[in-house]
Amino acid sequence: MSRIEAPLKTILLLLKIQEDKALHKNTSFWFAILAPLIIIIWIFYLLTNELILKEAFYINMSSESLAAFVKHYAFPITLLTLPLTFGVMVNRFHSSKQKAKTNNLVERNNIVNNFFTHYKNFSEFCDKIEQRYNSNKLTLTPEFLYRDIFPTSGINNFTTTADSKFISVVIDKIDKEITQFINHSNKVGYNNISNTRVLKERYRYNSVVNGLNHSILIDTDHHLHTELTKAYTIAISLVFFIGTSNSAEIYNQYHLKFKQLMSNRFYEEKDNIFIDDKNDT
């Protein structure tokens, strides 16, 4: 079987139309022209040889000899159109494959360009958010944030659809951060100063948003509430980047969940905000 497959693969390779090569360098082009031409020449030879044996072959520029030539060689003369026809067919196929390859390259180039333009605009958007919160001394890392918000986007598959899990993870981290703060407060205790509970030992808060570099010492429940609200606001602002196609859907899906979480874990009293320890699970 291998003895048959090897030469068959070689023949198919020779007959393959290679769009990355010039037409005249394709063996399929020359095969389409020369193969029928050789057969036609062979038919001419057989007919001529038969006429010679019958002593009916003669060359004479007269109407009778031309009529006899057309009569005897009508079939191979008709076949002379085949090399041209096959050559044109291979040329069309070659051009079609080249055009398809060019279109694929253009499409891929557009995807790559769109991806890098999208990332560049997102990075500039992160800079604007940094400037907005400049007084809080926080920095954003666009490469981490972009990968979390658009995990399926890349040079091979550009998309403007944000992953809703980005906000979902932030909300879950906020919930865990509140629990950790409560555990810390139970351990170190509070001092009551002017209707405000102040931790005896401050709590180290690190941002709940991956790619948002912000670390600060917190001493009150109100301060924690402010920092967590700020983190969520920044996260949802990142999703509302103008290059995101589904920002409204994510907002509608998770904003109410965030508000419910904060209302369940905190309460207001005398213009101050406290953690509701009873709702800690």
Image: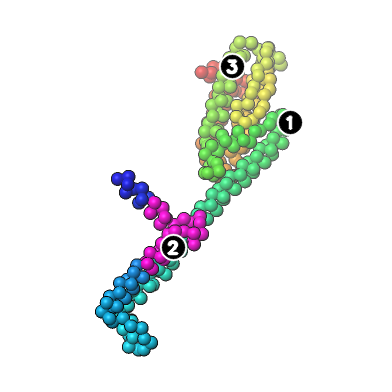
Tell me, for residue 30, which label it has, or none.
2
* Amino acid bearing label 2: Trp
Closest to the observer: 153 or 241? 153
Indicate whether 106 appears above or below 212.
below
Q: Is residue 6 magenta?
A: no
Q: In this image, 50 relative to 100: left or right?
A: left
* Amino acid bearing label 3: Ile
First in sequence: mark 1 vs mark 2? 2
Which stretch appears magenta? Answer: 10-38
Q: Is residue 25 magenta?
A: yes
* Amino acid bearing label 1: Ser
**Residue at numbered disc 1:** 135
Mark 2 or 3: the one toward you: 2
Rendered residue at 36%/48% (across/down): 6
Indicate whether 22 appears above or below 180.
below
Indicate whether 81 appears above or below 14.
below
Rendered residue at 32%/76% (across/down): 48
**Residue at numbered disc 3:** 182
Q: CA distance from mark 3 to mark 1?
A: 27 Å
Provide the major secondary structure of the magenta segment: helix
* Image location (x, y in percent) of residue 96: 46, 60
Given contact means CB atoms under 8 Å apart, are the residues at marks 2 and 3 in contact?
no
Image quarter of residue 32:
bottom left
Mark 3 or 1: the one toward you: 1
